[in-house]
Image (tube, rainbow, N blue to C red):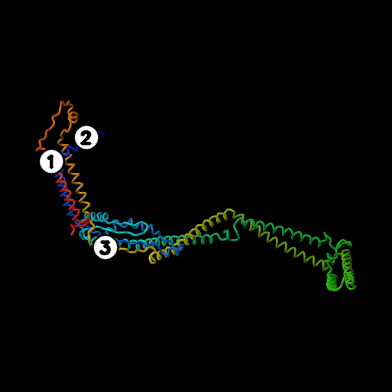
């Protein structure tokens, strides 16, 4: 640490030796710098404030029916893209700056300068934006801010309209494409149905259910045919005598199983009369008892006649009423058997036809399902696009006419009478600091170019030779007085430099020329 302090003292002594060069340099730099700052042209700042209102009562009312963009995100994008090259080139045309442009390099320089000088600031969550621009010409600065304000407002409205129009164009293209797909799918489905009529699953169920149903119907028809054939064979046996039905022992069969039209009609009449009597009398009533006894006698008589008819010669049996009824029953049985045979044949043919289609029908069903799936997908997408198009139209109208995001100019573009820059006081201070630093630096450089030894240790270290002794400088009173005068003159020069600085700070406005 002591070595560092010793070295610092050596530097200070070297600078102090060339202090007049330092003062001269400081005065030169200060005067030149102050003159340059004083001659700097005044700048006028034009500014405007705009408020973007994103709160609208229609947004919650139309929720679910429309799709509105995020206004905060739109504001962010607009603020970031406002000072872009296309917008700056448009500003140049709006304020007629392109008239002074002679070549592409000048245009590029002007565009770059404007992009750097135009400022857009925001207050944060309040959605209040400030546009400002500094220029020597206050009118030009105001025109540029006004042009940028116009672009900001028009850009928001036109951007929303362009987004809505682009969305509608895209949806219309998709609707047209899906409409073509839907028409093609409908045509393919219709042609497929016409080509494969009778094989489609919608006609009476799918193939496997039809096959099972045909097998069940065939089994039922065969069972019914078997029953009809057995009934027919039984009637034949009765007619041919292989199964006698008329020769009975008394008590072996009920009279109701014997057919005798004459007696049956009388018994039926007596039964009807008996039913009427039972409604009014009891079983012990004489009329009821007599009617029952008469019915029993007729039934016994029918049995006896049946026995007598069984013992006679069979030559006239075809003319017997009972045989006529049997023949009629046989004819009906034959007709029923023939009908059931035809039904069985039809069911067999249907079953065989379905079995023969075992390879064709599943393929038809699979292709039918594929066609229906494609048709349903295209139809669903087409209907969704129609709904989205209606929603997009409402959203576009709502966005463009109702003002979901409105612009309000808080402060129009204005230019104050007093210039906004440059800040001469700040520049004067910087020039003073630079002048002092320049003077010290210049004295330090000279001391390094023309070094002197201020101590024995420095000389011994540099030369490597032993120091035998030192001879001190003895100053006379006249020399001491002369040194004091030089110190006073040095101090006065510095004080005059500071006095000039104070005068400039007092009589010069911060952002203009001299004070009145």
Q: Quadrant of the C terminus?
A: bottom left
In the rendered view, does 261 fall on the left or right side of 168?
right
Disc nearer the start of the sequence (3/1): 3
Q: CA distance from mark 3 to mark 1?
A: 60 Å
* Helix, strand or loop for disc 1: helix
Disc nearer the start of the sequence (2/1): 2
Q: How many marks?
A: 3
* Helix, strand or loop for disc 3: strand
Q: Which disc is residue 414 wearing?
A: 3
Disc nearer the start of the sequence (3/2): 2
Where in the figure is residue 76, as x and y percent of width and height? 36, 56
Where in the figure is residue 36, as x and y percent of width and height? 17, 52
Q: CA distance from mark 3 to mark 2?
A: 59 Å
For the residue carrying disc 2, how many other residues have a C-alpha within 10 Å: few (<14), some (14-19), or many (20+)? few
* Residue underneath mark 1: 484
Q: Which dot, 2 or 1, sits closer to the camera?
A: 1
Q: Which dot, 3 or 1, sits closer to the camera?
A: 1
* Residue underneath mark 2: 7
Q: Is residue 31 above or below residue 203?
A: above
Task: Place residue 303 in its image quadrant.
Answer: bottom right
């Amino acid at each position: 640490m002591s070595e560092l302090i010793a070295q610092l003292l050596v530097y200070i002594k070297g600078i102090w030796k060339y202090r007049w060069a330092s003062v001269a340099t400081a005065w030169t730099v200060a005067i030149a710098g102050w003159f340059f700052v004083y001659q700097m042209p005044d700048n006028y700042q034009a500014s405007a404030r705009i408020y973007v209102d994103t709160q609208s009562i229609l947004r919650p009312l139309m929720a679910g029916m429309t799709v509105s963009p995020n206004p905060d995100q739109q504001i962010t994008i607009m603020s970031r893209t406002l000072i872009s090259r296309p917008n700056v080139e448009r500003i140049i045309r709006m304020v007629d700056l392109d008239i002074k442009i002679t070549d592409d390099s000048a245009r590029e320089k002007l565009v770059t300068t404007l992009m750097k000088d135009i400022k857009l600031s925001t207050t944060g969550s309040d959605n209040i934006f400030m546009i400002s621009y500094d220029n020597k010409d206050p009118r030009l600065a105001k025109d540029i801010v006004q042009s940028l304000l116009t672009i900001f407002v028009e850009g928001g409205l036109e951007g929303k309209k362009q987004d809505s129009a682009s969305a509608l164009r895209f949806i219309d293209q998709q609707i047209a494409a899906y409409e073509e797909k839907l028409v093609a799918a409908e045509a393919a489905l219709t042609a497929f149905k016409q080509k494969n009529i009778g094989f489609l699953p919608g006609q009476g169920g799918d193939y496997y259910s039809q096959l099972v149903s045909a097998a069940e119907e065939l089994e039922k028809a065969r069972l019914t045919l078997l029953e009809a054939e057995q009934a027919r064979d039984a009637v034949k046996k009765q007619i041919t005598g292989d199964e006698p039905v008329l020769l009975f022992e008394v008590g072996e069969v009920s009279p109701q199983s014997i057919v005798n039209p004459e007696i049956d009609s009388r018994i039926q009449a007596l039964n009807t009369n008996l039913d009427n009597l039972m409604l009014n009398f009891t079983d012990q009533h004489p009329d009821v008892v007599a009617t029952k006894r008469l019915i029993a006698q007729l039934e016994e008589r029918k049995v006896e006649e049946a026995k007598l008819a069984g013992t006679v010669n069979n030559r006239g049996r075809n003319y017997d009423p009972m045989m006529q009824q049997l023949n009629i029953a046989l004819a009906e049985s034959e007709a029923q058997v023939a009908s059931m045979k035809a039904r069985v044949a039809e069911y067999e043919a249907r079953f065989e036809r379905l079995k023969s289609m075992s390879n064709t029908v599943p393929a038809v069903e699979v292709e039918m399902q594929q066609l229906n799936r494609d048709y349903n997908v295209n139809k669903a997408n087409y209907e969704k696009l129609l709904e989205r198009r209606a929603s997009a139209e409402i959203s576009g109208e709502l966005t463009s006419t109702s003002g979901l995001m409105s612009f309000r100019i808080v402060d129009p573009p204005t230019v104050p009478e007093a210039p906004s820059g440059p800040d001469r006081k700040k520049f004067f201070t910087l020039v003073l600091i630079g002048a002092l630093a320049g003077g010290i630096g210049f004295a330090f450089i000279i001391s390094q170019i023309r070094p002197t030894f201020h101590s024995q240790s420095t000389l011994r270290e540099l030369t490597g030779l032993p120091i035998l002794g030192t001879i001190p400088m003895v100053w006379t009173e006249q020399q001491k007085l002369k040194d004091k005068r030089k110190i006073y003159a040095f101090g006065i020069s510095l004080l005059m430099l500071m006095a000039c600085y104070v005068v400039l700070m007092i009589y010069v406005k911060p952002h203009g020329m001299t004070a009145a």
